[in-house]
Amino acid sequence: MITTAEIHGGSVFKMGNDILVVQRMLGIKQGRGGMVKRLRVKNLITGQTSDVGLDSGEKFEEVPLDTFQMKLSYIDGETYHFMEQTTFEQYEISKDDMGDNAGYISAEDDYDVEMIFYEGKPVGMNLPTKIVRTITYCEPGVKGDTSGKTLKPATVDTGIVVNVPLFCDMGTKILVDTRDGSFIERAK
């Protein structure tokens, strides 16, 4: 069994008779009734995408999956092509199926990803927790403009926006947490 707290981007679980893969985390809402995790999921049987809300205490049946270590070969428009490192087989997965993970990976990267397969078809992936990205655009920070920890939006080389501290400028290499898209520290 898998609980709501263990579900993240790329997780696959069974809800009723449907087998769902999490494409995007939409947020967490807390209130009087408890915590609700909002997700965008894709049904692997019908191919439909929908938004669901899961209560914090819910448990779901895990789905048997196969995982393989792969490297990104190239990106062709909206399709990402990966190669398995021992058999050199090529697999492709669409940007929609990758969900949030598409914003963290580029063809210049040289790290392995764990591709998730359901019945021989790639349905998602697990990235390393920390990846290095380069800031391509951000507004300059004004010294003395704050009395606490202030963040500013910065666009990185893959196109996603990460909130970074004021001391980060264009060209700075940063570590990004792939679980939630947050800034960790400047890359060494």
Image: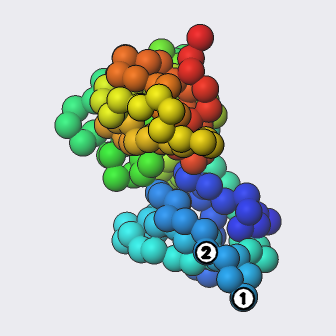
Task: Look at the numbered disc 2 and give the secondary structure of its residue.
Answer: strand
The C terminus sits in image quarter? top right
- How many tags in the picture? 2
In the rendered structure, which amino acid carries the disc numbered 1? Gly
Query: Colour scheme used in the picture?
Result: rainbow
Which residue lies at the image location 63% right of the left edge and 49% below the top edge?
65
Left or right: residue 169 compared with residue 159? right
Left or right: residue 62 compared with residue 107? right
In the rendered structure, which amino acid carries the disc numbered 2? Lys
Comparing 127 with 132, the one in front is 132
User: Vertically, is 149 above or below 113?
Assistant: below
What's the mark number on residue 114? none
Q: Is residue 88 visible?
A: no
What's the mark number on residue 29? 2
Residue 7, position as x, y percentages in the image: 66, 59
> Which residue occupies the extreme top position in the image?
188
Comparing 106 with 85, the one in front is 106
Q: Is residue 1 visible?
A: yes
The N terminus sits in image quarter? bottom right
Residue 154 falls in image quadrant: top left
Residue that label 1 marks: 33
Comparing 31 with 20, the one in front is 31
Task: Look at the numbered disc 1 and give the secondary structure of its residue.
Answer: loop
Within-10-Å neighbours for mark 2: few <14, some 14–19, many 20+: few
Which residue lies at the image location 62% right of the left edge and 55% below the top edge?
8
Q: CA distance from mark 1 to mark 2?
A: 10 Å
Residue 170 falls in image quadrant: top left
Residue 33 falls in image quadrant: bottom right
